[in-house]
Image: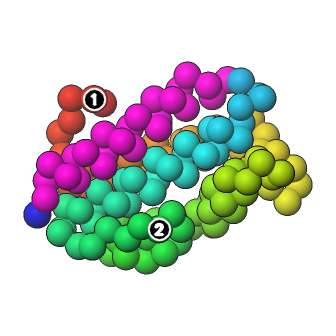
Amino acid sequence: MKIELAKAWLEASYSDLAVIKEIIHIDYLSNMVAFHSQQSIEKSFKSILEYFDKKVPKKHNLNALYELIKDNVPLYDTDILEELNELYIDSRYPNSFALMPHGKPTLNDAKRYYEFADEIFNRVSEYLDIKTDFN
């Protein structure tokens, strides 16, 4: 087990959540809330892989990462992972900037993404029993 590296991934995940807390109320930045939510979840998932000394892929696809850790932290609703995957990919190209099929994420969408990312972070921290000084 690589507890220190798992903790580092969780700290990085928490950093994304901290950014979201600062911007969650700004409608204009709803796409950035979605981006940081995706990043936080990705890092939380990767902390599990690191903890169990499994290869951490250089992938950003939440569904693919979830397949690797789903026995550790089962989720009841994985549809949001696909939504965040699409937003993450689109946010990397200036012509899209994290647009959903119906346009930019609403502030309500952004809050839902944040709450989901926060839940994942807390569940993973609890599951791995990693006490942190940053949360």
Question: Which span of residues is magenta-colored?
Answer: 2-25
Dot 2: within a 10 Å radius of its alpha carbon, few (fewer than 14), some, or many (20 or more) residues? few
Confirm or deny contact between disc 1 and disc 2 (CB under 8 A).
no
Q: In the rendered image of this protein, does residue 91 appear above or below residue 78? A: above
Query: Could you say where residue 97 lies in the image, as x and y percent from the top left?
Result: 76, 47
Dot 1: within a 10 Å radius of its alpha carbon, few (fewer than 14), some, or many (20 or more) residues? few
Where disc 1 sits, the SS reads loop
Which residue lies most toward the left here? Answer: 1
The residues bearing labels 1 and 2 have C-alpha atoms spaced at a distance of 26 Å
Residue for badge 1 = 134
Say the numbered circle drawn on residue 59: 2
Quadrant showing the C terminus: top left
Three-letter amino acid code at the position of disc 1 = Phe
Three-letter amino acid code at the position of disc 2 = Lys
Q: Which residue is at 38% across, 38% downward?
A: 14
Q: In the rendered image of this protein, does residue 44 appear above or below residue 106? A: below
Predominant SS of the magenta segment: helix
Task: From the image, state whether disc 1 or disc 2 is nearer to you.
Answer: 2
Specify the quadrant of the image occupied by residue 87.
bottom right
